[in-house]
């Protein structure tokens, strides 16, 4: 029996949860059963990758080849009305669709595996036109908010997929409610390998400008600088903690991902709160484990989310965490058992929980160790890959089985 030919399609490979999920899958997929190809709709863009971060070097380091369709992304910072966006996007989307259909035929693809956003839109259409099954991965936040299509057409598009994959049950329920007809929606949480470290805590403190000392504690949030990540709430909590503990520092690590005005707002609020000495912003293109080596407590202040990969990274490294009760997070981080869970948009609750962990080291250690055990039980890269492989096998046409 020959290997199934899987084509994993994603828009680009900037730093982000969807891109990291694909990297984990590609590292762990069973090569005896599957012949996987990775394809981006957009061509590499060095200038944009410097601004947004790129996972392409990580794919290369894992010896995973990445093809692309050669399309160029719109210039960063351009603002146009809806009519202009539609007029400019339609020919580009049609051209990309034609290229993807040709790629599927050329490489004899058995199953198309699409990952969020435009890759779902174009990938599902190309698979249908090529008479190939398609597995579409979405995190709910982008599924029913198209820039150029009606909500009903978006729901119809996902309804045409062979299977839909998401990472949390609340998002799966949302997707099922929006679909025009019943469809298999599989909940498969993100899985990762424990982040690797190349630099010591001392090196990272020096690089980040954070002082070293017995009393210094670093609270860190890793994630893209987008409003739904809740950084402004974190800054309000930081202001409360800083008034009573001058040795606590806050590390905010992430790329702006197309939200430069949000980054400016974060820096402005930091100045208003007079936190410039204690709040550190960083974009880090290397091993994310280096950043975690500088973090004592992890925080994730999201206001709108599915199941953030950054939380899983912290769990893998036994980092005690304070997170918000959004979507699938409370089912992964059990309040009082493997972390502390607080309401979203509540700076005081966030500050109180962080203060509790700063003052109770045995509790922090216990929560971190429990979080690591939960990671090992259900959130490794191999576990995710095996579950996705079964979805691929289940939708494959008989001739490819």
Image (tube, rainbow, N blue to C red):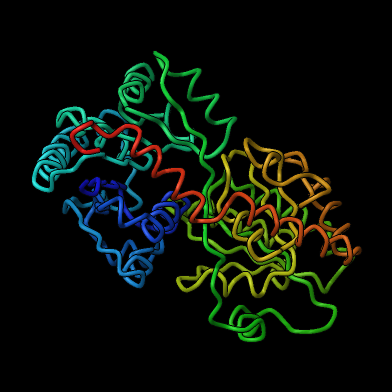
Q: Nearer the viewer, residue 31 or 159?
A: 31
Q: Position of residue 274 (x, y in %)?
A: 74, 65
Quadrant for the C terminus, please.
Answer: top left
Q: Residue at x 50, y 70 (%)?
A: 284
**How many dots with numbers?**
0
Q: Position of residue 269 (x, y in %)?
A: 66, 56
Q: Nearer the viewer, residue 70 or 337?
A: 337
Q: Is residue 21 above or below residue 304?
A: below
Q: Residue at x 36, y 57 (%)?
A: 26
Q: Position of residue 208 (x, y in %)?
A: 61, 78
Q: Residue at x 57, y 71 (%)?
A: 289
Left or right of residue 169: residue 157: left
Residue positioned most to the front: 1
Left or right of residue 32: residue 125: left
Q: Nearer the viewer, residue 228 or 342?
A: 342
Q: Is residue 318 above or below residue 79?
A: below
Residue 239 quadrant: bottom right
Q: Position of residue 377 (x, y in %)?
A: 64, 52
Q: Residue at x 54, y 31 (%)?
A: 171
Q: Is residue 157 above or below residue 121?
A: above
Q: Is residue 37 above or below residue 317?
A: above
Residue positioned most to the top: 181
């Amino acid at each position: 029996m020959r290997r199934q030919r899987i084509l994993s399609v994603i828009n680009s490979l900037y730093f982000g949860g969807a891109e990291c999920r694909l990297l984990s899958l590609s590292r762990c997929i069973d090569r005896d059963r599957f012949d996987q190809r990775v394809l981006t709709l957009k061509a590499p863009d060095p200038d944009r990758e410097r601004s947004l971060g790129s996972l392409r070097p990580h794919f290369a380091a894992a010896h995973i080849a990445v093809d692309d369709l050669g399309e160029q992304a719109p210039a960063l910072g351009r603002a146009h009305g809806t009519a202009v966006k539609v007029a400019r996007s339609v020919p580009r989307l049609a051209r990309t669709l034609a290229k993807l259909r040709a790629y599927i035929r050329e490489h004899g693809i058995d199953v198309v595996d699409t990952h969020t956003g435009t890759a779902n839109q174009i990938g599902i259409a190309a698979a249908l036109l090529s008479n190939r099954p398609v597995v579409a991965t979405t995190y709910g936040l982008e599924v029913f908010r198209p820039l150029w299509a009606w909500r009903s057409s978006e729901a119809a598009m996902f309804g045409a997929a062979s299977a839909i994959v998401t990472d949390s049950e609340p998002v799966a329920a949302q997707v099922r409610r929006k679909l025009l007809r019943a469809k298999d929606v599989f909940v498969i949480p993100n899985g990762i390998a424990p982040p690797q470290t190349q630099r010591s805590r001392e090196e990272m403190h020096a690089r980040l400008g954070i002082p070293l000392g017995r009393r210094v504690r670093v609270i860190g949030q890793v994630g893209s600088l987008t409003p739904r990540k809740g950084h402004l709430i974190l800054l309000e909590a930081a202001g409360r903690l800083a008034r009573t503990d001058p040795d606590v520092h806050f590390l905010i690590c992430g790329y702006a991902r197309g939200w430069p005005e949000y980054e400016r707002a974060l820096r402005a609020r930091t100045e208003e709160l007079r936190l410039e000495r204690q709040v550190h912003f960083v974009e880090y293109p290397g091993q994310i484990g280096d950043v975690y080596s500088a973090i004592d407590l992890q925080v994730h202040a999201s206001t709108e989310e599915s199941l953030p990969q950054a939380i899983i990274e912290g769990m893998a490294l036994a980092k005690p965490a304070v997170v918000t009760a959004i979507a699938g997070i409370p089912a992964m981080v059990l309040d009082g058992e493997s972390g502390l869970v607080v309401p979203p948009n509540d700076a005081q609750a966030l500050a109180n929980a962080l203060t509790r962990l700063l003052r109770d080291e045995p509790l922090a250690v216990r929560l971190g160790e429990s979080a690591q055990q939960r990671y090992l039980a259900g959130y490794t890269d191999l576990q995710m890959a095996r579950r996705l492989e079964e979805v691929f096998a289940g939708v494959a046409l008989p001739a490819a089985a």
